[in-house]
Amino acid sequence: MEKCVLQIKSGMYAEPFFADGSYSEEKGLLKYSWTEKHPNERIPSSFELVCDFGGKQITVVRDGDVSSKMTFEPGNRTKGSLNTMFGVIEVNIHTEYVNFPSALNETLEFGYTMDPDSGEPIKNVFSIKRLLQKSEE
């Protein structure tokens, strides 16, 4: 895996987030890994995002104060789970679209709605981009 700086945008953050991370591309898979530490968290969260071009599927695994595994498939409904201090929360995920990276645009972006069966669905657009500058070691 190549070390790099990642730019992450999400409706969960007011501003883009930049993180030292790693990136690899092989056999139709893109893999991104990074760590985030936000003020309201006790410990940093580590993330791994795997984009499978062949299966047109994205899997995101998070470990930290909140642990989760979510799968995103354009046009399909999938299940995910969040393990929080309040217990495990099962969620239904509807992925509206995925813009896969290409030679003209290196950003991976996907829009989805996550419904924790509370009657209050959460809409989000997430994007990640590998920046050209290298991270500090």
Image (tube, rainbow, N blue to C red):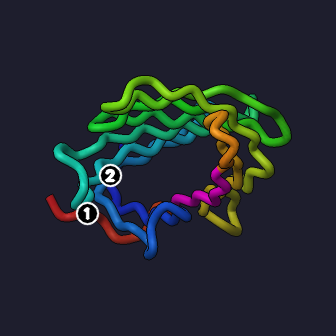
Does any portion of residue 28 appear in the rendered image?
A: no
Residue 37: percent from left, percent from top = 24, 54
In terms of depth relative to the viewer, which is nearer, 7 or 112? 112
Query: Contact, CB < 8 Å: mark 2 with mark 1?
Result: yes
Check residue 21 in the rendering and tell me which mark sits there, or answer none: 2
Q: Which residues are magenta?
A: 122-128
Where residue 133 sits, quadrant-wise, is bottom left
Badge 1 element: loop
Name which of mark 2 and mark 1 comes first in the sequence: 2
In terms of depth relative to the viewer, which is nearer, 4 or 87? 87
Q: Point out the residue furthest to the front here.
A: 119
**Which residue is found at the position 67% from the left and 37% from the top?**
72
Check residue 84 in the rendering and tell me which mark sits there, or answer none: none
**Which amino acid type is marked by label 2?**
Gly
For marks 2 and 1, give the CA distance: 8 Å
In terms of depth relative to the viewer, which is nearer, 88 or 46? 88
Determine whether 18 is above or below 120 in the image: below
Q: Which residue is mark 1?
A: 135
